[in-house]
Image (cartoon, rainbow, N blue to C red):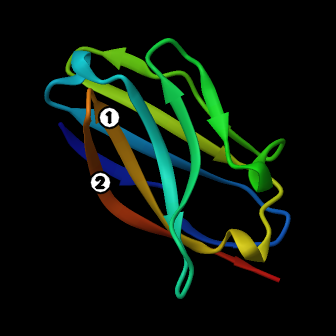
């Protein structure tokens, strides 16, 4: 499974961004997709996940502000989206896309999200 993330950037507090993660390869084996983030000097946080059955899960601090979309299978790609609203400076981090196939986890390249106060 290969993952391609996009959509990060710089935004003011209260603003919005949408991250995209396109998975290719053995997409019909994917059980779950999601995003984790890591800020300098902080531990990795699992931000949001969605299963192939569309069950979602969120980090407490982003509930009500972030929405992960249903996985869409279109030909040879799975795409997941993370809509981030009401962004806060503490959301600043590098966001990484992930996908799980059984016990194996795949990770895409990170995309920087910076929220200015």
Q: Residue furthest left?
A: 25
Q: Residue furthest front?
A: 103
The residue under the point 56% across, 73% down is 93
Task: Classify 54 as above or below 25.
Answer: above
The mark closer to the camera, 1 or 2, is 1
Residue 59 in percent (x, y) is at: 69, 49
The residue under the point 29% across, 52% down is 107
Q: Label 2's element?
A: strand
Task: Classify 78 as above or below 37.
Answer: above
Residue 3 in percent (x, y) is at: 26, 45
Q: Look at the image and tell me whether residue 113 can be seen.
A: no
Q: Do the residues bearing badges 1 and 2 touch, measured as CB atoms within 8 Å? A: no
Q: Residue furthest bottom?
A: 41
Q: Label 1's element?
A: strand
Count of number-bearing discs: 2
Q: Sort mark 1 into few (<14), some (14-19) or many (20+) by Cα contacts within 10 Å.
A: some
- The N terminus, quarter of image: top left
Q: Earlier in the sequence, mark 1 or mark 2?
A: 1
Residue 96 in percent (x, y) is at: 42, 58
The residue under the point 77% across, 49% down is 60
Residue 48 in percent (x, y) is at: 59, 43
Q: Which residue is mark 1?
A: 100
Q: Sort mark 2 into few (<14), some (14-19) or many (20+) by Cα contacts within 10 Å.
A: many
Q: Look at the image and tell me whether residue 15 can be seen.
A: yes
Q: Quadrant of residue 66?
A: top right
Q: Quadrant of residue 42?
A: bottom right
Report the side of 52 relative to 48 (left or right): left
Give the CA distance from mark 1 to mark 2: 12 Å
Q: Which mark is residue 108?
A: 2
């Amino acid at each position: 499974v290969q993952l391609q993330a996009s959509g990060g950037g710089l935004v003011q507090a209260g603003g919005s961004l949408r991250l995209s993660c396109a998975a290719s390869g053995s997409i019909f084996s994917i059980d779950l997709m999601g995003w984790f983030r890591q800020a300098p000097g902080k531990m990795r946080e699992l931000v949001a996940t969605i299963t192939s059955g569309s069950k979602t899960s969120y980090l407490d601090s982003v509930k009500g502000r972030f929405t992960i979309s249903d996985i869409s299978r279109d030909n040879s790609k799975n795409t997941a989206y993370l809509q981030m609203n009401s962004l806060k400076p503490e959301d600043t981090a590098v966001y990484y896309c992930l996908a799980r196939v059984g016990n194996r986890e795949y990770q895409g390249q990170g995309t920087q999200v910076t929220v200015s106060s």
